[in-house]
Image (cartoon, rainbow, N blue to C red):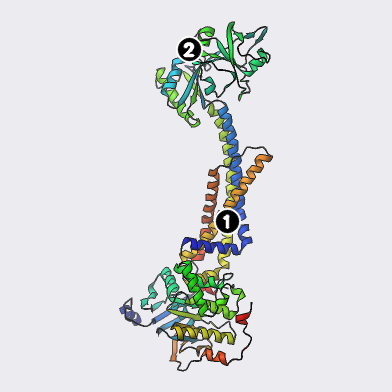
């Protein structure tokens, strides 16, 4: 109970220029019939602006629950979550929807693009809910697709795109409202190794060149090596939190790979 | 997220599954088309009855002297001498709902011309110069008698077509003189053909004379049998009836607890009974059609529920990306309203076509009013809201995490 006493002393809005993300004694319990499942048992985590963090752990370790809370899709049972200085653990459903819209970009394992909707329109979707004018939406969506290298594929439907291309559309979609953080949940889980490296390259470029904060959930240790910090979850607690001094560079690896036929760029 | 944006999303979602959308709309289309056609037939029937009503005269009422039941003695209407021409004048002067009035005097008698004689089955009627207007019964030949003829009790008459055919053997009767109860009358006009009345009586078998002539020269009476009244409009006949009753009770000094010594008969009453029964029939059929519209609505709900389940993942994506649940609800609600409204509009078109086909092939009069079109489109939209609300609420209540995980 003492954790609550401590947290209640915290101001609701952190006015100081603090961490981008701060989880403060976050607990999450699920009620499954008569059984209480403790998914998170007091997580303290800070992510600073511009970081590239990989979150690892076995299934059931609490990493997905943490992702859901970080993504404002779920609320902690106890404890506080400060995003950009704002305590979002007390917000209503609609307020959380607005936070997701403005501050968080999602990239999923299954891409989660709207089917029978062009790449461009998929990327425009978050701006639609933000209420931007069509001209502004088109401009920003085009830019985002250029950043991920898909300007030639704007009008293709998702089923006309390869897995890697679909994931890049999803990344463009996550970028387009200029979020505080991109949350990527197993983004390479459905991709082959080369395409995985390509997607990781996109993330690394966004992080290094544009300073975009990225949190990436993965269970593949070699994918985590592209990040600059690894947080390992086990049994609802953080087991390890360490810096990677010399992360893998996706760009260098791609250059050293033999040039196979690049079906992602040229097929029609 | 404005309404137009949501509408476009809804429209796109519907166009993605065209066959399903059109089958769903079919229920509404059939329902609305049925409503339009049935109401069209009903209103057509109503209009033709209304035409019959107006043929009876211009919103006509009759005031008869003598109540049907007076002081225990049952005398026929018109059998007592209580109505006068002054009553008729007073009605015209003092009842705002009354447009025109003519006193009426009934007489019988043999009509004689040369060696022919004829007894008019509809009798000899005394009236004033407003008779053609009140009865909506113009002359086709010659002219009607004038106010001066009425004032001077002139011996002129206007005859019906049957009288002309029989007494004058089809010859032109204008200007000829015939004898009524042995008095010479000059024929100055022939009335247009009116045909049989509701009771099968030949209305053209009649002679019209100035009522003053009938009173003074034929019957030697000072009273009149009836007053023919034309109200200002069809809907005013009831008001007119009331005003006339009040006025005559006052003029005849009838105490509040006494029966009237006159009878007001509203001719529109009878015709309106016929109209009412056709309206009941229309309402009955229309309610059957509305039931089919509701069944169409249930079809919409069914498809929307399937659609919400199918698109669970899409809903999850939209929510994760920042759609508030209200926006999701609106999107699905607009989808169902669009289905029902578009179905309604197509249904209106089919309904109009159906009623045209019905009136051509079955020769039934049909009348599709703009009112029934607007009402059925609005009603179908209401059906869309009603049956779209539950699926839309279900979509909005989804949890984004579960929805994203849904396979």
The foreground one among B160 and B270 is B160
Q: Which one is nearer the viewer's eye here, B81 or B69?
A: B81
User: Which is more toward the observer, B153 or B371?
Assistant: B153
Residue A244 in picture, x, y percent from top left: 46, 92
Residue at point 51% right, 65% down?
A: B395
- Location of the N terminus of chain A by quadrant is bottom left
Rendered view: B96 above or below B357: above
Q: Residue at x 61, y 91 (%)?
A: A258
Q: Are marks 1 and 2 on the same chain?
A: yes
Q: CA distance from mark 1 to mark 2?
A: 73 Å
Q: Mark 2, chain letter? A: B
Chain at numbered mark 1: B
Which of the two discs, 1 and 2, labels the residue nearer the N terminus?
A: 2
Give above or below for A163 relative to B298. Answer: below
User: Where does residue B92 sit, x and y in percent of width and height?
Assistant: 44, 21
Number of callouts in the render? 2
The disc label shown at residue B267, or none: none
Can you identify the residue that label 2 sits on? B151
Residue B238 horizontal/vertical position (percent): 47, 29
The residue at which mark 1 appears reads as B298
Q: Residue B3 placed where, x, y %? A: 47, 61
Specify few, some or many for label 2: CA neighbours under 10 Å numbering under 14, 14-19, or 20 or more.
Answer: few
Question: Dot 1: what SS?
Answer: helix
């Amino acid at each position: 109970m003492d954790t609550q006493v401590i947290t209640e002393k915290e101001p609701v809005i952190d006015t100081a220029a603090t961490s981008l993300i701060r989880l403060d004694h976050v607990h999450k319990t699920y009620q499954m019939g008569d059984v209480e499942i403790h998914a998170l048992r007091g997580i303290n985590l800070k992510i600073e602006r511009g970081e590239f963090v990989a979150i690892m752990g076995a299934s059931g370790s609490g990493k997905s629950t943490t992702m859901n809370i970080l993504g404002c899709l779920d609320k902690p049972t106890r404890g506080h979550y400060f995003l950009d200085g704002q305590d979002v653990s007390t917000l209503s459903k609609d307020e959380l929807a607005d936070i997701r819209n403005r501050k968080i970009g999602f990239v999923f394992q299954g891409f989660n693009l709207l089917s029978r909707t062009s790449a461009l329109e998929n990327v425009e979707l978050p701006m639609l809910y933000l209420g931007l004018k069509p001209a502004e939406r088109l401009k920003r969506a085009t830019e985002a697709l250029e950043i991920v290298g898909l300007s030639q594929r704007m009008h293709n439907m998702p089923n006309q795109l390869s897995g890697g291309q679909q994931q890049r559309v999803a990344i463009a979609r996550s970028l387009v409202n200029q979020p505080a953080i991109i949350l990527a949940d197993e983004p390479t889980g459905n991709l082959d190794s080369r395409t995985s490296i390509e997607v990781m390259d996109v993330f690394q470029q966004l992080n290094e060149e544009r300073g975009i904060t990225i949190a990436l959930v993965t269970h593949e240790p070699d994918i985590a090596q592209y990040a600059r910090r690894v947080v390992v979850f086990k049994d609802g607690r953080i087991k390890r939190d360490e810096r990677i001094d010399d992360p893998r560079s996706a760009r260098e690896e791609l250059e050293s790979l033999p040039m196979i036929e690049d079906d992602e760029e040229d097929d029609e | 997220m404005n309404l137009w944006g949501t509408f476009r999303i809804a429209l796109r979602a519907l166009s993605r599954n065209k066959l399903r959308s059109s089958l769903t709309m079919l229920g509404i289309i059939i329902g609305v088309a049925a409503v339009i056609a049935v109401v069209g037939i009903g209103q057509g029937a109503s209009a033709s009855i209304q035409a019959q009503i107006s043929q009876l005269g211009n919103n006509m009422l009759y005031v008869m002297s003598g109540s049907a039941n007076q002081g225990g003695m049952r005398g026929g209407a018109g059998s007592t001498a209580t109505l006068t021409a002054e009553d008729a004048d007073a009605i015209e002067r003092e009842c705002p709902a009354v447009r025109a009035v003519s006193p009426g005097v009934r007489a019988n008698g043999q009509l004689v011309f040369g060696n022919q004689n004829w007894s008019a089955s509809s009798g000899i009627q005394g009236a004033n110069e407003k008779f053609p207007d009140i009865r909506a019964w113009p002359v086709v030949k010659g002219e009607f008698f004038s106010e001066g003829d009425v004032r001077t009790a002139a011996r002129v008459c206007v005859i019906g077509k049957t009288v002309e055919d029989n007494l004058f053997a089809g010859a032109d009767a204008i200007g000829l003189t015939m004898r009524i109860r042995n008095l010479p009358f000059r024929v100055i006009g022939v009335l247009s053909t009116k045909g049989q009345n509701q009771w099968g009586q030949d209305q053209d078998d009649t002679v019209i004379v100035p009522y003053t002539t009938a009173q003074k020269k034929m019957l030697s009476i000072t009273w009149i049998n009836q007053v023919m009244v034309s109200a200002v409009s069809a809907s005013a006949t009831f008001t007119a009836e009331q005003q006339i009753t009040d006025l005559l009770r006052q003029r005849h000094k009838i105490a509040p607890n006494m029966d009237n010594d006159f009878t007001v008969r509203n001719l529109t009453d009878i015709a309106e009974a016929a109209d009412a029964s056709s309206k009941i029939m229309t309402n009955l059929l229309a309610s059957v059609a509305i039931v089919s519209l509701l069944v169409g609505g249930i079809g919409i709900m069914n498809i929307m529920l399937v659609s919400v389940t199918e698109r669970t993942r899409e809903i999850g994506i939209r929510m994760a990306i920042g759609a508030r649940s209200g926006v999701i609800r609106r999107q699905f609600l607009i989808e169902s309203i669009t289905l029902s409204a578009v179905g309604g509009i197509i249904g209106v078109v089919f309904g109009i076509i159906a009623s045209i086909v019905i009136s051509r092939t079955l020769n039934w009069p049909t009348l599709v009013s703009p009112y029934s079109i607007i009402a059925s489109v609005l009603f179908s939209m209401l059906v869309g809201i009603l049956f779209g609300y539950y699926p839309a609420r279900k979509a909005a209540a989804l949890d984004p995490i579960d929805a994203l995980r849904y396979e």
